[in-house]
Amino acid sequence: MIDELYSREILRRTTQLKHVGHLDAPDGQADRVSKLCGSSIHVEVKMDGDRIADFAQQVEACALGQASAAILSQTVLGASVDEIRAGRDSLRALLNGEATQIPARFSDLRILESVKDFPARHTSTLLAWEATLAAIGAAQQK
């Protein structure tokens, strides 16, 4: 069962987190925590209109949360709010076993398809996406 969940590709992605740290004077920031497993993430963003100009994250998560955050972090710069939302919504649909069209920018989310069989892990897999959208929301409130 564990081999089905933690594929070699998912484990490889845990080592590919980008934009780790903090930003000077972020426009918005947010924290998200998975109550079930304790995984947490802190995200900071700088916006240029509706696009992410800069991004930083602090990830203390399980392999699934790390892999998902890594996929986001590799292509987040320049992404629009709508693209981030579409990525999150596609990941959520994928985890629910629904047919979905994943945005090309985030096509690597497909490697997380096996997580659909483990509902208790869905929250940690979505953490980076939820935190990023919350940080964008905080930036838009300013």
Image: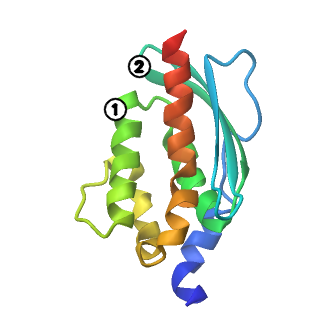
Name the residue at 38% across, 46% down: 87
Please indicate whether residue 21 sits to the left or right of residue 120 in the image: right
Name the residue at 55% across, 90% down: 1
Please indicate whether residue 4 sits to the left or right of residue 34 in the image: left
Residue to which mark 1 is pinned: 82
The C terminus - image quarter: top right
Give the mark nearer the N terminus: 1 vs 2: 2
Name the residue at 61% across, 59% down: 65
Residue to which mark 2 is pinned: 50
Kindly state the secondary structure of the residue where label 1 is placed: helix
The image quarter in which residue 58 lies: top right
* Rendered location of residue 83, percent (x, y): 36, 36
Q: Does the image show residue 140? A: yes
Note whether 23 is above or below 112 in the view shown.
Answer: above
Mark 2: give few (<14), some (14-19) or many (20+) Cα within 10 Å. few
Note whether 57 is above or below 120 in the view shown.
Answer: above
Kindly state the secondary structure of the residue where label 2 is placed: loop
> Is 48 or 29 nearer to us in this picture?
29
